[in-house]
Image (tube, rainbow, N blue to C red):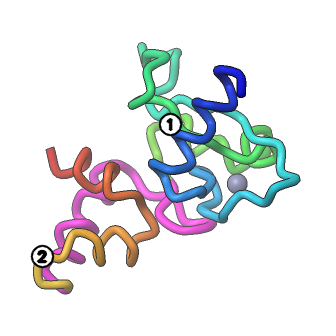
Amino acid sequence: MNYRQILTEALMQRDGNRCWLCGKPFAVQDAVHFDHAVAKSNGGPDTFANLQLVHAFCNISAGRKPHQKGYRVLKAGIFVSSDDMRLRIRETLVQTGGDKGKTAALLGISLRTLYRRLE
Ligand SMILES: [Zn+2]
């Protein structure tokens, strides 16, 4: 395995094998792009924490626009701002009685994202 493959595997494990833009799982034949959570144009670094995987076709589609303005995908096709996401996480945590795993699953986000948003 080369470095790119190792990094891809690690990101897939971290984020549950899902595309950050559409929220759908990657199929074996899908072309995968690296994407920056905080855009490079906004000073986002090339670190593991700031990288996420997206379908190549999502990365170049119209769906990319809201993401570039600091919006994130909640579930397939639904874009929310970081503040909205934080609010939804808090609301869902109350609904699940503080179960972080269940909350992340319900929102279609990784546990890591949940923790990052609660910081
Ligand atoms: Zn996608």
Predominant SS of the magenta segment: helix
- x, y percentage for residue 3? 64, 20
The kind of residue tagged 2 is Gly
- Which label sits on residue 99? none
Left or right: 91 in relation to 50: left
Magenta span includes 46: no
Question: Looking at the image, which residue is at 71% across and 35% down?
Answer: 33
Circle 2 SS class: loop
Q: Is residue 82 above or below residue 3?
A: below
| Nearest-to-viewer mark from 2 and 1 | 2
What percent of the width, then of the height, locates residue 75? 53, 68
Residue stretch rendered in magenta on the structure: 73-95
Is residue 110 shown above or below 96?
A: above
Disc 1, SS: loop
Task: Name the foreground residue: 57 vs 115.
Answer: 115
Q: Which residue is mark 1?
A: 69
Q: In this figure, which residue is indicated by the disc labeled 2?
A: 98
**Which residue is at a point 58% across and 30% down the rendered structure image?**
7
Q: CA distance from mark 2 to mark 1?
A: 30 Å
Q: Position of residue 15 (x, y in %)?
A: 48, 52
Residue furthest to the right: 29
Report the image quarter containing ligand 1. bottom right
Label 2 CA crowd tier, 10 Å (few <14, some 14–19, many 20+):
few
- Looking at the image, residue 26 sits to the left or right of residue 41; the answer is right
Q: Is residue 93 magenta?
A: yes
Q: Quadrant of residue 91?
A: bottom left
Q: Position of residue 79 (x, y in %)?
A: 51, 58
Seen from the viewer's position, the closer of residues 69 and 4 is 4
